[in-house]
Image (spheres, rainbow, N blue to C red):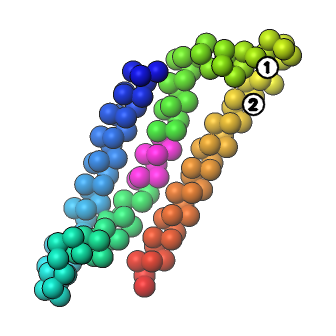
Amino acid sequence: MLALVAALSLYSGGYIAEVVRGGLAAVDAGQVEAAQALGLSPIQALRWVTLPQALRVAAPPLASQYLNLAKNASLAIVVGYPDLVALFGGTVLNQTGQAVETLSMILGFYLVLSLSLSGLINLWAARQARWAVR
């Protein structure tokens, strides 16, 4: 489990860091210069000028990467399939003997997880887009 968490953290962290870096690089340098000309400190310029624009650009790839993280976690669990079945499915499977229904419940859990994550990220992206228009 520790190797799984470490591998997924390093793998996803690298991609997410690159997406955020790309979003920050997409903000025109003139925007930062204009914020400085208005007398904003570097932190204020980052908070009020750079980040809103960068997040609007980075939201779709971030959403994709977080969904990939959820899917990769479920695939990594498949590698440790006996652990998952022993933890959740083992109890139900031993008591009922219905393997298809038990695995369907596990599949349903990952489906709900992926759709919920996707919906939350889409709501966040829409909120960012509305906020950026103001």
Q: Which range of residues does the magenta coloring cover?
A: 61-68
Q: Is residue 113 above or below residue 31?
A: above
The structure residue drawn at horizontal position 71% and vertical position 36%, both measured from the top left corner, is 108
Query: Could you tell whether 45 is left or right of 76 in the image?
Result: left
Q: Is residue 109 above or below residue 79?
A: below
Q: Secondary structure at mark 2?
A: helix
Q: Amino acid at mark 1?
A: Val
When asked about the image quadrant of residue 3, the answer is top left
Give the labeled residue for mark 2.
105
Give the labeled residue for mark 1.
92
Disc 1 and disc 2 in contact, CB within 8 angstroms: yes
Tell me where residue 133 appears, x and y as whole percent. Answer: 43, 82
Tell me where residue 52 appears, x and y as whole percent. Answer: 35, 71
| The magenta stretch spans residue 65 | yes
Label annotation for residue 25: none
Q: Is residue 73 above or below residue 48?
A: above
The structure residue drawn at horizontal position 29% and vertical position 40%, both measured from the top left corner, is 14
When asked about the image quadrant of residue 100, the answer is top right
Q: Magenta stretch: dominant SS?
A: helix
Q: Amino acid at mark 2?
A: Met
Tell me where residue 77 appears, x and y as whole percent. Answer: 54, 23
Q: Is residue 99 visible?
A: no
The structure residue drawn at horizontal position 62% and vertical position 20%, both measured from the top left corner, is 84
Q: Secondary structure at mark 1?
A: helix
